[in-house]
Image (cartoon, rainbow, N blue to C red):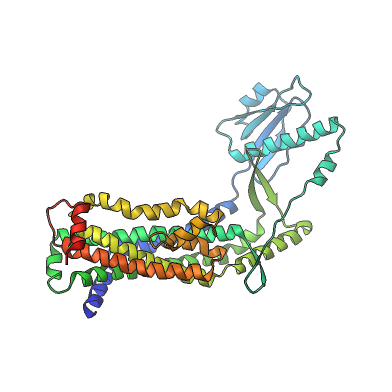
Amino acid sequence: MNKIGLIIKREYLTRVKKRSFIIMTIIGPILMAAIFIVPVYIAQMEGEVKIIGVIDETNLFKSKFASGDQISFIDIDEPLEEAKTNMDKNGLYAILYIPASELNLPESAIIYSSGQPNIIVKGVIKNTMRKEVEALKLSASGVDPNILKSIRTNINLLTIKINEGGDEEKTSTELSMAVGFISGFLIYIFIFMYGAQVMRGVIEEKTSRIIEVIISSVKPFQLMMGKIVGVAMVGLTQFTIWIIATLILISSFMAVFSDDISGHEISKMKMQNGSIIQESIINTEENTEDINQSIITIYESIQSINFGLVAGSFLFFFIGGYLLYGALFAAIGSAVDGETDTQQFMIPITVPLILSIALAQFIIQDPDGPIAFWFSIFPLTSPVIMMIRIPFGVPFLDLLLAVVLLILGFLGTTWLAAKIYRTGILMYGKKVNYKELWKWIRYK
């Protein structure tokens, strides 16, 4: 056991001192924080106001295009050709030309621009024209547009979960989906990343013949376990630093820019009738109550997720999944002479992991279904699938069964990998196939 500890210490210290580890440990939190910070920062940047000249030959849209902080509409009385010639001189971003139509109401328009008009501009124009034409059609049919507008209703669907004790709590399917998928995807990435490190480490030591010196002092099983656990500790160290540093960066950003963010109007994009429409939501007296209620609902939904269970399960399934796959990756590394020879053995091992991510959308749609159950207890897929299920609420027996089977799966794959490792680690210059691996496993 003391020898395994020495190997773990060697693997850990060797890897954390590498330049690549230090660089990735610094860059990782910056990249993860940037995913949150950059969109928020860009949203607060006030870009150049785009001035759009409107030539309306129908006279139906006079003053109908509302100007905002980013787009300004002005009516132009000069002829179209002259307006196009003076577009840059007049500082226009584009010209909206609505030609007179033989029909009663126009159903098309033309945008003239020196560049490609962005999708927000096109969305605002299409939405404004659509609403105005629809209102005119309703008026022509004798229908008051205000009546139609008044009967439009937004339905807020609140979900309440009743637990085994009969207590009720508000939940959010969307939030559970996000937490589950992100957790499962992170485990998928980390298993691949750190498992590959174990395999490369074994291949490097084998090809450099250092393994012959090491194996004279320790048993192959001790060496394999030391490498697997050592790399696992490196992964946990890096992951912990990433999480803490990312939270610090995001918290610092929010503390510095919170006043600027709250002072701006909230912009959101909505997809409707195939076009993107920009809506500006300003905190006025009439919608403050709705916004506060939405915030309360979101907060209650967040509270409904047992983040302690999610974090504990994530740690266990990350470690358990890594140890299971790490042993298999170590066995592959010991059986080949170079990384190019690993492909034939990698496919059977990686298929369950890839299948887990491929099935994620189906698991999210039916987290309590038979497919979700069986794949969440199968050791090769449970690290990803069970993490996807947990935010939705998993029966204790399902979770316990997955934990027990994952532990048994790790012990089984470790025993299998040790059989291959002890023979393959000193095998050179021979192309290994599955038949040969089966012989190694049967050796006593």
Residue 190: image quadrant is bottom left
Residue at 54% across / 57% down in the picture? 369
Whole-percent x and y of residue 323?
33, 66
Furthest residue toward right = 142
Looking at the image, residue 389 sits to the left or right of residue 347; the answer is: right
**Position above or below: 275 against 264:** above
Looking at the image, residue 262 sits to the left or right of residue 42; the answer is: right
Q: Nearer the viewer, residue 64 or 415?
A: 415
Q: Nearer the viewer, residue 237 or 114?
A: 237
Q: Report how many numbered discs are placed on residues in the image.
A: 0
Residue 160: image quadrant is bottom right
Question: Can residue 33 be seen in this snapshot?
Answer: no
Of the 4 image quadrants, the one containing the N terminus is: bottom left
Whole-percent x and y of residue 408?
36, 69
Furthest residue toward bottom = 2
Whole-percent x and y of residue 232?
33, 68
Residue at 17% across / 67% down in the picture? 444
Residue at 62% across / 32% down in the picture? 94
**Position above or below: 184 against 105:** below
Q: Nearer the viewer, residue 158 or 371?
A: 371
Furthest residue toward top = 102
Looking at the image, residue 363 sits to the left or right of residue 62; the answer is: left
Whole-percent x and y of residue 142?
87, 33
Question: Can residue 177 be seen in this snapshot?
Answer: yes
